[in-house]
Every structure is written in C-alpha cells, then in structure tokens.
Image (tube, rainbow, N blue to C red):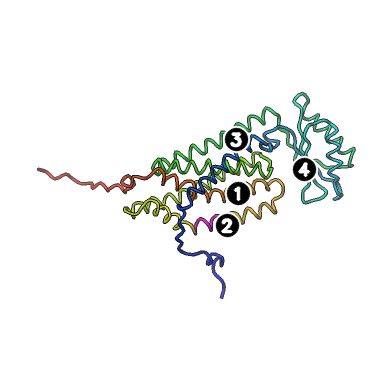
Amino acid sequence: MAMRGWPLIKLLPTKTNFRFVRYAKAAGVISVILCVASIVACFYPGLNMGIDFRGGASMELTRANGQVLDLERVRGAVGELGLGDVQVQGIDDPSSAILRFQVPDDEPQSAVVQRVENAITASVGEVTYSGISVVGSKVSGELFQSGLFALGAAIVLMFAYIWFRFEPQFGFGAVASLIHDVILVFGLIVLFKLEFSLNMVAAILTVIGYSMNDTVVVFDRLRENLRKYKTMPLREVIDLSINETLSRTIITGLTAVMVLAALALLGGEALFGFSIALMAGIIIGTYSSVYVGAPIILLWGVKRGSLDEPKPIKLGMASRP
C-alpha cells in the first residue's frame, strides 16, 4: 500500500497545550540583548559591504582546458596594482574563481579592468574573463540608501496593513516583530561575515514578508478566539491561539528551511549568503510571532467589544405610522 503524504507530519501532535506566555519575560530579555548586540555589531566591526554598496569591480576567472587556477598568484598579481582590498574566492570548479577589487575614482573603469586582466594573464597564463560588473562609489552609495529606504518603506506599509485589518495594538506588535527580525538578521550577517549586497536586501525583504504572514495567521486566530471566549483571561487566549496555529507554523517553516538548505549547498557562491540569511530570518520570524508580537498585545491589552462582528443592517421599507 502506497504511503500517502509526508510521513514525518504524523510525528507532529495534532493538539498541543504549551504555555508560551509563561516564558515571555525571559524571551523578551533575550531578544533585547540580542537586538542591542546586533545594532552594535552593525557599526563595529560593521557590515561586510559588497561591490554593490562599496563600489568596485567583480569578475569570474576561468583557466583554459580545465587547468587549476592558482588563487594566490592571482591575488598577488592584482594586489601589486594598488587597488585596495582584493578578494579572490574559489568555487566548486578548481579552474574558476571570483575576483573582487576596488576601482579608483580618478581612473577610467575600463582602463582599470584592462590592467587587472593583463596582470592576471601575465601571472597565471591564459584566462577567460566573464560576468564583469563595475559599480562606482557614487552609485554604490545611492544603492545603499535606496536599500535602506526599501526596508523602511516595507515596515511602514506592513504596519499600515495590520492597523487597517486589526486593532492598533496588533499593528504595534507586528511592527515590533518585523523590526526585531530585521535587526537580528543584520546581526547574523555581521556574525557570519556574509557579504551585504543587493541579494541580501532581497533576502531581508523576503524575511519581512514571511514574518508578517506568520504573524497575521497568529493574530487572526487570536482575534477569532477573543470573540469566541469572551470571559477567558487574555493570557490563556494567547496561549490557545498560538497552540492552534503551531503545527501549521512548524510545517511551513521546516519546508522552507529544507528548500533553502538545498539552495545554499547547491546554488553556488552567489546564492549562499542569500539562502543563509533567509533561513535564519524564517526561524527568527517564527520565534518573534510567538514571543515578540503576542506578548506586546498582552501588555497593551485588548478591548474585546471592539472586536465583535458588526450586526447586519436590515434593509426594507419603514412601517408607516
């Protein structure tokens, strides 16, 4: 008989009764400490800016006939040109590598790239150059500002959506979760020394969307239970709502993490940082929905009368006196 569905789903209990709110204070303290540490880390030692935000050039090198590319000789040849920080990263193919270097503002970009190619060819032999990307310092600064603006605009729009759909306290809880997630993802980027590029901005924006989706699911169930259990203490209603959405949250999160893990292992250097940041963001977003957004509603309180369904208006002709 063929097995239907994913067998590991059967390991998840259909009904749980965890008391999440009991540990809300301890989780809040841990979250505050991690957020402060992440903010400090963003300034010291700071983000590892990629070519997109720092300015410079990037290219892929490939030796002819599959010969092994000597990374140290490439690094030494480019380093002698005085182009600042030179990064040479090998990839799965030993005959290929990715080279990154800075481009002086007072020299034409094409001339700098040509000097680099000539130096590498003279040092290691015939090399094929592809994927050449050059970003000026002025453009990189504008891209960095645009990236930060995109993150801020996403948070503001999410807050407006939650405020419109729910009560204001739900909106503040959701925004607190989003800011918490973004700060911790930045901290992990610094901790693992991942390159902060436009791909990383896309990963953080995706984390914001995932975190908001997870928070909305919990808040929607919370609102339903507040209408259903009018006399139950708010603390118990929050625990009940989180437990009722827990299996859905775990299944969705694990599925996404497994896909991203495969992408990190098989997607190459260009997608590794993106996948790691997104995996961390999904885990942090799941945690924040339980221990950041919901506890804020507990502290703020909810007016249950405002959550009642509006009574339908009966349309008809008024009776004559």
Q: Residues within 10 Å of mark 2 (few under 14, many from 20)?
A: few
Secondary structure under tag 2 reads helix
User: Residue 95 location, x and y as percent?
Assistant: 83, 48
Between discs 3 and 2, the one toward the N terminus = 3
Number of other residues with Cα within 10 Å of mark 1, as a class: few under 14, some 14 to 19, many 20 or more: some
Residue 153 percent across, percent down from the top left? 52, 35
Task: Give how far apart the Cα atoms at labels 3 and 2 are.
Answer: 28 Å
Labels 1, 4: front one: 1
Element class at badge 3:
helix
Q: Please name the residue that numbered disc 1 is placed on.
A: 280
Numbered disc total: 4
Residue span colored magenta: 247-253
* Residue picked out by circle 4: 98
Q: Is residue 117 above or below residue 218?
A: above
Question: Which picture quadrant has residue 88?
Answer: top right
Q: CA distance from mark 4 to mark 3?
A: 24 Å
The residue where tag 3 is placed is 147
In this figure, which residue is indicated by the disc labeled 2?
Answer: 255
SS for tag 1? Answer: helix
Q: CA distance from mark 1 to mark 2?
A: 14 Å
Residue 147: image location, x then y, percent: 60, 35
Q: Is residue 166 left or right of residue 60?
A: left
Residue name at image x 44 percent, y 60 percent? 17
Query: Mark 1 or mark 2: which comes first in sequence?
Result: 2
Cα separation, mark 1 vs mark 4, equals: 26 Å
Amino acid found under the numbered disc labelled 2: Thr
**CB within 8 Å, label 1 to label 4:** no
